[in-house]
Amino acid sequence: MLTGRESLVRLVGRRRRSPLPASLAVLLLSSSSPSPSTSPAQADDGGGSGEVAGAEARSSSGGGAEWVVCPVCGECIRGSDHCVNTHLDICLTRGLKRKLTQSTLLNFRFSKKIAAEPTSNSLDNEVETENMKQIDEDLSSDQAFFSLDSGIGSSKVGRRFHENVELREGEGIIVLRDPQNVKDPDAIKVLYAAFECEEMLGYLPRELAKVLAPLMDKHYVECEGLVVGLPERHLDNVPIQITIQKCKSDNQRNDDPNYWQPLWENFISAVRTGNFQQPSSAIYQTNFNLMIADVIANHTHVFSDQEKSFLGSFKLLSDDGQRLFVRIYTRKGPWFRKSSISYREISDLEHAVMELKLAGYIDVLSCTDDPSEYDMKEILDVLSVPEMKEILKELPKNNTSCTRRHGLLSTLLSSYHSGACAALPKRILKWTGTCIKISKMADVLLWRVQRLFFLNGDQDLSSFLLVEFGVVKFPDYACSVSHRIFQERSDLLEYEEAVQVAQVMDESLDNNSMELVTRCIDLSENRLCTMPEQENTTSSEPSPSFFSCFSAFWVYSKILTLGVSVYERDHRYEDAIRILKRLLSKVACDRRRGYWTLRLSVDLEHTGRPNESLSIAEGGVVDPWVRSGSKFALQRRVLRLSKPPRRWKVPSYAAHVKRNIIEVNIEGRPLNCETGAKNVFYGYDGELCGVEQLALQYYADEGGGWQGSHSEGGIWMTIFGLLMWDVIFSDIQDVFQSKFQTAPLDLETDDFYKSRKDLVESQLKKIQDGMAEEMLISSWELHQGTSCRGVNWDRHSLTDLRAVVACIGGRRLASLLRHLAIDYRSWSSGMPDLLLWRFLDERGVGEAKLVEVKGPRDQLSEQQRAWILVLMDFGFDVEVCKVSPVSKRR
């Protein structure tokens, strides 16, 4: 992947669907290059997602290559090697999070305390409580009872309730415990007694089952019920009534009241306080409203009066209108057939559609409308392949023989744009029927709301779901906010426009539209030229430096960093040199200066300018923002280029850079020896493995009886997170601004150590004094399962982590953790592949070793060399293990 592509994808996050603003579209889609004097596009004009740009890119990228279906996301992509590889890289980088569907979003009760325990949604079936009658209980009596009105919901795995059962009102149900349920030992199932086989209908909600199950297990209560109504639609809830009655059993009389009485009181309290009247499927509605309210309250200055009025009108919509909007907003779209929309929590779809249209939240396209106002490709996307074939049959002189979706779509679009068939638009709308989509105004504003709420492009509305299902648990911290991220509305609009340019760049690389990529690079360069230098930006109350990542300046610098990689790949070194010089002159305080300086020195050498290349490298060595691997690489370049007569004096760091690194050579029997392919060897146990696993087997056997882990920097990031937990989540101004953060905003900046120096050094003193293992155990027990940047709870066991910190020793461990605390970003990658440890006696005295493994033809990167030298300075035992094929002489 191109350098900078992955970070650009994370920056863009959820792509906007609405078209580009007119001013930005002119700059990017016109034939002329953008001018530095062009004013920034305003979000008020209706921002966009760059889909128009993507369409333009597809049409301008030329033909020739066949289209293929991506096995990850299912999208059609051009079949050239570069296009396919780039698209797959992006899909795999984004992961499975984007596979979540609209029916599984926004289910976290935002107002309650975050808990790791899964809800009743983890059961295959559930009984959702809708109404609760007046509870009539007498806690002091031997017999008390009350009734609950409940509803049996639809299955979570596709099987429909009562599909083969004829439900009758007034028929009885049976409530039984299901202690063998693997998903919930407190599960309580409901059977339909009228059916001769007692067909199971579902489960009681987990919140209710948790307090009722102990009473049923001890036979303290009896439960019975009946069906009190029939659903209007097949998948609607089935209303039931449950009666719970205290038993007069010998067990209850003989047991200690101090045991069973609290169980009954807990049950009564849960029923009293539980909100069983709201269907769980509507939780997303509450969360969406809370998200809007939170953003309006904390960022009101960045919205115009019209925008605030528009967002405020959302809470005035009916429940059906709100639920329908959130449902379609979280789907891909953009168009949806009204006939295909069916959600059981929406009772009146027609009214909801009309209400949203009148409020300006959706656009409606019917058979009588003029489709020329919309993108015909987007409309055609709702059609199936058989429907497209039927439309083509109606066209005069139709000679097409294509059968695949892309070919059919291209034929229809070509016929539409050529105007050969005047009746074609009406025929298309006849097949699509009435369609709806999110309006441009709603898409722009809700994209902004989501961005301000999560403060990144990585997270989206599915974060609510991940919390509710217990997949993610966010840490406890205080949000102490004293500065605004966006001081003025104009700052936000400029930032949004920059993100739009980044999105167009991302889409253009997907579609291999290099002309549009070049325009994005040129526009970003011109925007950067017109902005003041970063170090000269002053205000009456300066914002924290770690807010810089929310500026247009920062986004354009990321686009240009990726642009350098694009130009270098195409051997356009002069263009790359121009951009790199621009970045270094405009961005004074940024850790990417090391990468920029290194690439500038390399590209200058490519163009035959060794003297200038040497001067750039020498300047980078003394630049305080050039660090870790980049600094080490520049030092090595200086030593290589500064031969007489260019330079006569040997630099002071020459001896440090030229230090020898211990190497160990082992041989293995390879499965393949192909250049560029992943190295696969037969291990000591005869099984196939990679070079790292082969090295682990060697060190465990003849290499000295070491235990170990192949984790590169993962295990160190986990140890850092656990031992520095209280430091990371300490109460520091402005670093926590969202409830969905796994790290403070300043973790990867110099401010992290500066603002917490006393706390950091206090923790490091304890670690140096030998308290690391005790601190590790305590942190693990207190925070296990909670998300924290770098901490991997599943990959590393507490036993292994304890062994590691015990064998490393307090002094070396404290030195390494201080190094990470001072500059987390620069040193969070490139650590040796293997961490090995072994105990020397029964008292727990041990030793550790770090090993970088290299297969045939592999070389150490500059970042890896820098890490090895740093670890040697800290007193670690470090070596490089080179794996080579078995010698033929054997």
Image: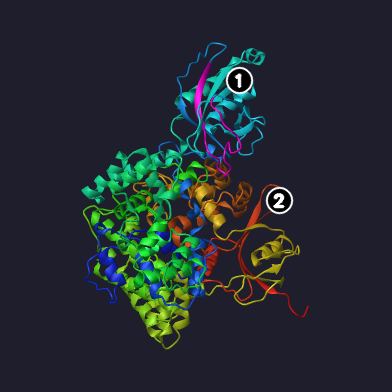
Q: Position of residue 237 (x, y in %)?
A: 50, 34
Horizontal side of residue 68 vs 34, given as left or right: right
**Disc 2/disc 1 C-alpha distance (Å):** 61 Å
Location of the C terminus by quadrant is bottom right
Label 1, residues with CA under 10 Å away: few <14, some 14-19, many ≥20: some
Q: Position of residue 582 (x, y in %)?
A: 31, 73
Q: Which residue is mark 2?
A: 841
| Mark identifier at residue 525 | none
- Location of residue 456 with respect to 405 vertically, above or below: above
Give, as a single range, the part of the protein colored magenta: 145-169
Q: Which residue is mark 1?
A: 222
Say if the magenta span includes residue 243.
Answer: no
Q: Is residue 326 visible from the viewing direction of this image?
A: yes
Q: Residue furthest top?
A: 141
Mark 2 vs mark 1, foreground winner is 1
Dot 1: what SS?
strand
Horizontal side of residue 330 vs 829, given as left or right: left
**What residue is at 45 percent from the left and 55 percent from the top?**
821
Q: Quadrant of residue 355?
A: top left
Q: Quadrant of residue 813?
A: bottom right
**What residue is at 53 percent from the left and 11 percent from the top?**
140
| Amino acid type of the residue that numbered disc 2 sits on in the rendered structure | Asp
